[in-house]
Image (cartoon, helix red, strand yellow):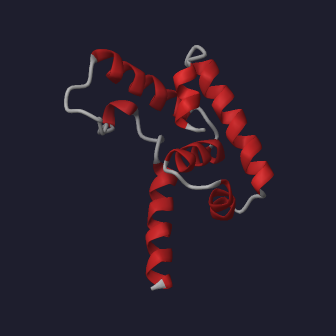
Amino acid sequence: MDKHINMVEEYKYSKVQSYGTNPPENSTPVWGNNNPTEDDVVDLIDFQTSLQKLTSTEREIIILVNQGYSKREIAEMIDLPETTTQDIKQRAINKLRGMMNGEDSIYSLFT
């Protein structure tokens, strides 16, 4: 059973590593409803474009946080101390805010 869980986690993590590296126009967004507004689409493209500008470690941490992993789990996945992971997360959030004109909605995604 543990072996299966590890395989699933490794697969999920491999997907995280490639997330945000494809051009936004090639991505298929998943919407909470079936009718995204034009603003929703623009915000998603802006976010994905900004995400691509982060370092690979920053991007991985942001995506893993958004997927609900704990600080400890993320630190184990990327083999860094929890405090370092937290510092990188905060730096990435600040970068995203700067790239997206200080939108506070970004911060709420990762807290």
Residue at x 59%, y 29% (from the top left corner): 107
- The vertical placement of 100 against 26, above or below, is above
| Residue 43: quarter of image | top left
| Residue 81: quarter of image | bottom right
Quarter the N terminus occupies: bottom left
Quarter the C terminus occupies: top right
Is 70 placed left or right of 31 in the picture?
Answer: right
**Relative to the observer, which residue lies in front, 102 or 52?**
102
* x and y, in percent, of residue 48 in the image: 46, 32
* x and y, in percent, of residue 67 in the image: 49, 50
Residue at x 61%, y 55% (from the top left corner): 70
- Name the residue furthest left: 34
**Relative to the observer, which residue lies in front, 22 or 90?**
90
* x and y, in percent, of residue 22 in the image: 42, 40
Is 99 placed left or right of 33 in the picture?
Answer: right
* x and y, in percent, of residue 102 in the image: 60, 16
Residue at x 24%, y 33% (from the top left corner): 33
Residue at x 52%, y 53% (from the top left corner): 17
| Residue 15: quarter of image | bottom left
- The vertical placement of 102 against 85, above or below, is above
- The vertical placement of 6 against 101, above or below, is below
- Please count the marks in the image: 0
Is 14 placed left or right of 104 in the picture?
Answer: left
**Relative to the observer, which residue lies in front, 43 or 111?**
111
